[in-house]
Amino acid sequence: MTSYVIPAHDIVGLPVAGTSDLFPVRRVYCVGRNYAGHAREMGSDPEREPPFFFCKPGDAQAVVPAAPNRVLELPYPPLTNNLHYECELVVAIGRGGANIAVEDAASHIFGYAVGFDMTRRDLQFKMRDAGRPWEIGKAFDFSAPIGLIHRAEEAGDINHAAIQLDVDGVTKQSSTISHLIWSISETIANLSTLFTLAPGDLIFSGTPEGVGAVVRGNVLEGKVDGLSPITVKLV
């Protein structure tokens, strides 16, 4: 048995609907500005911008399982005065590959979940304006709460599902997955030209318009039709 010089890191496991099994998280990829309305509210032209990607850590400090029918208490992160929610459909990869064809991409999907791409917007913009990477705005501790994973064959017509986020019972984001600029299959195909995808990878597919700031005490509920919703309270 291999001996490590320090304790080995735990693998984050996300619950899978209908089983006691866990989905082991490897990498977490995120698609930037993949809804036209959100691209516009961020000051970009969605008709001219090809898909781009950034990453979040796949470890237990960043990826937080959000159990169904429970409120996950999420710490408000340090060094920000402008924490934003971004509700997204998360795609769980079950079969890896590189240079995956669009028409074959769906066969690489294990399932789907609802997730929040929490963002320290002030720090993200500070880095953006300085021409520096976004990590401190996107990849901080507890930045990726994710709900129950549903197998692809049990998720219904996910490509036309409604997506919604409410803050304290008031709807802030409302759209459908069909409004993605780059579809799920196109996103997988494009991402696989940049990285060799592997089982355990997660892809945050993009967020609709309506993002905004939240404060301690706010309760966020994210929904995608056919999937278990997640509820988060900032503390």
Image (spheres, grey):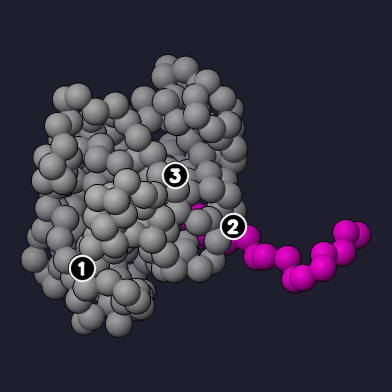
Query: Residue 19: percent from the left, percent from the top?
Result: 54, 57
Mark 2 neighbour density, 10 Å: few (under 14) some (14–19) many (20 or more): few
> Residue at label 3?
29
- At a point 42% along the width and 17% down the height, the residue shown is 103
Q: Nearer the viewer, mark 2 or mark 3?
A: 3
Give the amino acid type for the residue marked by disc 2 in the picture. Asp
Res. 21 mark: 2
Residue to which mark 1 is pinned? 82
4 falls in the magenta region: yes
Q: Image height check: is 8 above or below 36?
A: below
Most prominent secondary structure in the magenta stretch?
loop
Drawn side of residue 39 relative to residue 190, left or right:
left
**Residue 163 higher or lower than 193, as above or below:** below
Q: Magenta segment range?
A: 1-19
| Quarter residue 21 falls in | bottom right
Distance between mark 2 and mark 1 Cα atoms: 36 Å
- Which of the image's four quarters has the C terminus? bottom left
The image quadrant that residue 54 belongs to is top left
Q: Residue most toward the right?
A: 1
Q: Residue type at mark 3?
A: Tyr
Q: Nearer the viewer, mark 2 or mark 1?
A: 1
Q: Nearer the viewer, residue 132 or 146?
A: 132
Q: Amino acid at mark 1?
A: Asn
Q: Tell me the residue at 16%/25% (across/down).
A: 47
Q: Is residue 90 among what the camera can see?
A: no
Identify which residue, 16 or 27, lies in the foreground.
Answer: 27
In this view, which residue lies farthest toward the front? 130
Label 2: which secondary element: loop
What x and y, as percent, mark residue 124?
29, 56
